[in-house]
């Protein structure tokens, strides 16, 4: 029996895919189709698929040409698959001409003619997209535009009246007013932390968003990147036992700029139901240059330190009854962490992609929250908790000056 294998993303299945699969099948007796995982696509810089993995597998199955469907998860898997399944022919569209010649060492390689005039990219371009305006300093703006280029269903709009949504990364004291105005005008908002300096103002913004059925999402690269998401789910599933202590160091902005970022892992892991919070802070020229915050929970404790005034290793350590997690610096843009136990044989090192400068993950989630009402990774109570901590600090509640 002659076995043929081919691979692809097969997003928004189209005639080009169908022709390719038919031709590949005709080369032998058994066709194996490798469908790339979303994670693998992201690793190779492609995160604009419209259909998720299950939808894409179903689409390939529905063509009736695949005798077997496998999932392509990592670079180098093609060689492993060819050997594992005893493949005779590797087939792929002619847009890859020459690229896979290295597989000739393992089997025959055939480049099949590509169907002209159709592609997933073209079809994605025809779908509705969100027009996003940007209120940010030039460097952040250009990074946002660059990263938005790899996400589908988004266009950058320079006319503030013509946009459907706004990205706000202006100085923190302008956020509340700018977010409020944008929401009142019917625009979805992605805003850097904090969205406001008080709980009352934050609640007011959420009330407007709800009334107008708009997305109000917090911009925080950490929250949306793959490593952080998995760290939280792993630890919440009991990987280190009961969590007793979360110790967060950095980032280096002041309390009003970066407290939200530092509080995110604390709230994700210990919840927002803290008993009290105290602050130890050092001021210079009217600005907080160093602040250490301590949140006391019924069964745990969390500390964070922010500010440009004291240098430190920007890592995060989470202690549990059975083990601990270490996220090396800078923990807020992490692609790697370790889970450690007394028995070193059980230790785990976990690696994840963090592609580009990390904006793409939150841009993708923002667009999908608008177009598909998908789940938002930072919960509302977490955003309100951030505002509450900041408000207590600004009001001087339990603030000790050093
Ligand atoms: N293919 C084809 N003709 C097309 C489009 C794709 O023969 N018009 C082939 C590709 O060469 C590949 C397979 O279909 O062998 C899967 O391609 P995939 O990358 O999933 O589809 P594209 O439409 O090329 O996707 P994109 O636009 O995202 O690159």
Image (cartoon, rainbow, N blue to C red):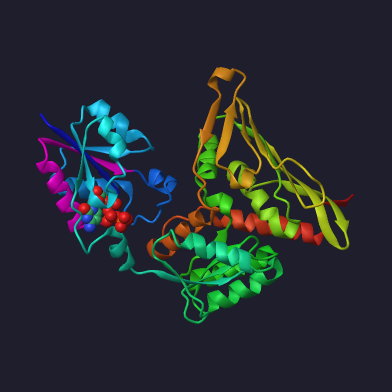
Q: Give the residue drawn at x 50%, y 74%.
A: 187
Task: State the residue in front, 172 or 383.
Answer: 172
Q: Give the residue drawn at x 52%, y 46%.
A: 354
| Spot occupied by residue 129 in the image (x, y as percentages of width and height) | 38, 69
Q: Is residue 43 above or below residue 259?
A: above
| Spot occupied by residue 281 in the image (x, y as percentages of width and height) | 84, 51
| Spot occupied by residue 233 in the image (x, y as percentages of width and height) | 50, 39
Q: Would you identify the image quadrant in which residue 149 lies? A: bottom left
Q: Is residue 261 above or below residue 197?
A: above
Q: Would you identify the image quadrant in which residue 76 lies? A: top left
Residue 10 in sight here: no
Does residue 21 show up magenta in the picture? yes
Q: What range of the chain is rendered magenta?
A: 12-36
- Left or right side of 28 for 294: right
Task: State the residue in front, 151 or 95.
Answer: 95
Q: Quadrant of the N terminus?
A: top left
Q: Is residue 277 above or below residue 396?
A: above
- Left or right side of 82 for 232: right
């Amino acid at each position: 029996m002659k076995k043929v294998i081919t691979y692809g993303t097969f997003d928004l299945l189209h005639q080009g895919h169908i022709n390719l699969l038919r031709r590949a099948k005709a080369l032998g007796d058994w066709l194996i189709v490798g469908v790339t995982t979303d994670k693998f696509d992201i690793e190779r810089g492609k995160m604009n698929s419209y259909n998720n993995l299950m939808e894409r597998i179903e689409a390939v199955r529905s063509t009736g040409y695949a005798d077997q469907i496998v999932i392509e998860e990592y670079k180098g898997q093609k060689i492993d698959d060819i050997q594992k399944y005893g493949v005779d022919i590797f087939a792929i569209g002619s847009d890859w001409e020459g690229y896979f010649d290295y597989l000739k060492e393992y089997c025959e390689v055939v480049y099949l003619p590509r169907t002209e005039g159709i592609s997933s990219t073209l079809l994605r371009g025809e779908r509705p997209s969100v027009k996003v305006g940007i209120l940010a300093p030039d460097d952040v703006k250009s990074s946002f535009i660059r990263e938005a280029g790899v996400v589908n269903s988004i266009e950058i709009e320079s006319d503030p009246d013509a946009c459907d949504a706004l990205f706000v990364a202006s100085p923190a004291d302008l956020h509340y007013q700018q977010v409020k105005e944008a929401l009142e005008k019917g625009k979805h908002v992605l805003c850097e932390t904090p969205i406001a300096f008080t709980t009352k103002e934050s609640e007011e913004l959420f009330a407007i968003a709800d009334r107008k059925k708009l997305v109000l999402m917090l911009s925080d690269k950490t929250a949306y990147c793959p490593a952080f998401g998995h760290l939280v789910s792993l630890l919440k599933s009991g990987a280190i036992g009961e969590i007793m202590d979360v110790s967060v160091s950095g980032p280096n902005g002041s309390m009003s700029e970066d407290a939200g970022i530092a509080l995110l892992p604390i709230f994700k892991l210990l919840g927002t139901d803290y008993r009290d919070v105290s602050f130890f802070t050092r001021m210079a020229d009217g600005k907080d240059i160093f602040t250490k915050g301590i949140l006391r929970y019924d069964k745990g404790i969390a500390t964070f330190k922010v500010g440009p005034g004291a240098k430190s290793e920007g890592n995060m350590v989470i202690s549990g009854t059975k083990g601990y997690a270490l996220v090396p610096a800078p923990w807020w843009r992490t692609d790697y962490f370790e889970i450690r136990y007394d028995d070193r044989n059980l230790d785990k090192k976990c690696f994840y992609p963090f592609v580009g400068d990390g904006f793409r993950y939150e841009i993708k989630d923002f667009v999908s929250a608008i177009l598909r009402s998908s789940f938002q990774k930072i919960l509302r109570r977490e955003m309100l908790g951030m505002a509450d901590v900041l408000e207590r600090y600004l009001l001087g509640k339990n603030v000790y000056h050093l």
